[in-house]
Image (cartoon, rainbow, N blue to C red):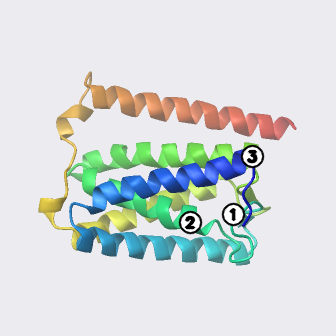
Amino acid sequence: MNIGWNVETFFLITGTVLSTIGSIFIMKNNWKQYGILYISSGVVGELLCYFFIITGLYVYPYRILPQISQMPLTLIMTMFPFYVMFGVRYSPARWAYKIPFYWVLVHIGMFGEVIAQNFTRVIKYNRFWDTWDSYTWWWLFLLIFEVIGGILVSKEYRKPIDEGVFTYGKLGWFIVHFILISTVFLAGFFMGMKTLK
C-alpha cells in the first residue's frame, strides 16, 4: 500500500471518500436501479482507462495500490459512477437544458484532471494525449450513460433540476456561466504555464 503525507494521497483518498458518500446518497433512492448504473459505469470507466494505459496514451504514476493495478482503482470505481449517477438523477428533462448541465459537470471534472496532471503525480499525459482528448471523452462517457441511465432508472427515482433556474438572470444561469468562464480561464492559464516551461 502506497500511502504517504503528500498531495497525491490526499487527492486520491479525498476523491474516493467524497464520491463514495455521494454515491450512497443517490443509490439509497433505489439500490437496484442505481446499483446497476453504478456497476456498469464503473466497469466501463475502468476498462476505458486500462485501454488508454496499455496503448500508451497516459499513465498513473502514483497509485495507492500499485501492486494490484496500473490505475487508481478506488478513485475510478467511485468517482466515475458518482458523476454518472449525479447526472442521471439531477439532469433537466429536456436536452436543451441537459447540455449546459453536463457542460458544467464536464468542466468541473476537467478542472480536477488538469490540476492532477499539472501539479501532482496522479496522472501524466503521454505524447498523443492532451486536455482536449480527455475533454472529449468526458462528454462521450457522460452523455452515453445519460441515455443508458434514462433506460435503467425510472422517472420516479430521478429528480430533474427545474429548467427555469437556467433562464437569464436566475441563479442557475449565473452558476453555469461562472463555472464555464472560470474553468476555461484557468485551463488556458495552466496550458500557458506548461507551454512556457
The amino acid type, in three-letter code, at marker 2 is: Thr
Q: Which mark is residue 127?
A: none
| SS for callout 2 | helix
Label 1–label 2 contact, CB within 8 A: yes
Q: Quadrant of the N terminus?
A: bottom right
The amino acid beneath tag 1 is Ile
Taking 116 as reference, is 175 above or below it? Answer: above
Residue 53 place in picture, x, y as percent: 70, 72
Report which residue position mark 3 lands on: 6
Name the foreground residue: 37 vs 3: 3
Residue at image point 27% right, 45% down: 97
Q: Give the residue pinned by disc 1.
A: 64
Residue 48 position, x and y percent, is: 57, 73
Say what amino acid the circle numbered 3 marks.
Asn
Q: Residue at x 74, y 76 (%)?
A: 67
Nearer to us in this view, 185 or 53: 53
Q: Are there few (<14), some (14-19), or many (20+) residues within 10 Å of tag 1?
A: many
Q: Secondary structure at mark 3?
A: loop
Q: CA distance from mark 1 to mark 2?
A: 9 Å
State how far apart marks 3 and 1 are (Cα). 12 Å
> What number is the disc on residue 74?
2
Q: CA distance from mark 2 to mark 3?
A: 18 Å
- Residue at the left extreme? 156
- CB under 8 Å between discs 3 and 1: no
- Quadrant holding the C terminus: top right
N-term mark: 3 or 1 = 3
Whether residue 103 is situated above or below residue 41 in the rendered picture = above
Q: Residue at x 12, y 61 (%)?
A: 156
Residue 140 visible in the picture: no
